[in-house]
Structure formats: C-alpha cells, structure tokens
Amino acid sequence: DDFTEEWKLCRVLGLPYDIGDWRDVLKRYRVWSRLRTYVTAPVAAGKRADVIWKIGMTLAEEDATGEEIAAVLIATKAWQSKHGSNPRALKSEIARLMSKRGRA
C-alpha cells in the first residue's frame, strides 16, 4: 500500500507530509537513540498514553513543531493502537503538548 496511515492522517489534518519521515524528525532533534524504541515497539494498553506523552514532550522540549511531533506520533505503535487514524485526537494531543512545552 503506497498510502501509509501517516500519509492518510496528514492528508485529513491538512498537515504537510513532506516534513520527513518520523526517523528524520528524531534525527533532526538528536533524540533518535532516546525515542526510537518507543516509536517502534508494541505498548501495553495501560502504558500507551504514557509513551505518547513521553515522545511528544521530548520533541516539544526540543522545539519541534506541531507538524513534526504529529509525524512521529502517528507512526508509533502506541498511537495506532490507542487512536488509529483519529484526527481530532491528534489535534487535541498536539495542542495539549504545545501548551505544556517548557512548563515541566
């Protein structure tokens, strides 16, 4: 399938898909080694929100844009198993992360 879940969700949300693959975003902010496993590993149902928050806040604290954070989150097993391709959930999560940036 040429149209990945990430592409579909970006299209629904009106986000640019050319910001790069999630791997590019993690490398751009030098968090590849810290977050790679969180993106690719399956997550138990009770831990998905924690993993999503950790990934999102780590990127937000590194000054990643909302679009970059979205590109990474929608690629995670945690996001896919918790929210699938729910655009409202993604918009809400990005807004929450951006509002908490720098407050931790």
Image (tube, rainbow, N blue to C red):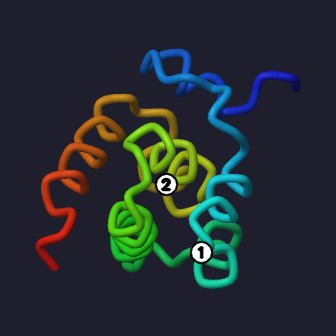
Q: Residue 28 appears at what percent x and percent y?
A: 64, 59
Query: Residue 72 vs residue 13: left or right?
Result: right
- Amino acid beneath label 2: Trp
* Residue at which label 1 appears: 31
The reply to whether the C-beta atoms of the residues labelled 1 and 2 are less than 8 Å apart is no
Considering only vertical position in the picture, is 76 above or below 65? below
* Residue at which label 2 appears: 79
Most distant residue in the bottom direction:
34
Considering only vertical position in the picture, is 86 above or below 104? above
The quarter of the displayed image where residue 33 is located: bottom right
Alpha carbon separation for disc pair 1 and 2:
19 Å
Considering only vertical position in the picture, is 42 above or below 96? below
Residue, x 16% and y 79% (percent of image)? 104
- Amino acid beneath label 1: Val
Q: Secondary structure at mark 2?
A: helix
Count of numbered circles on the image: 2
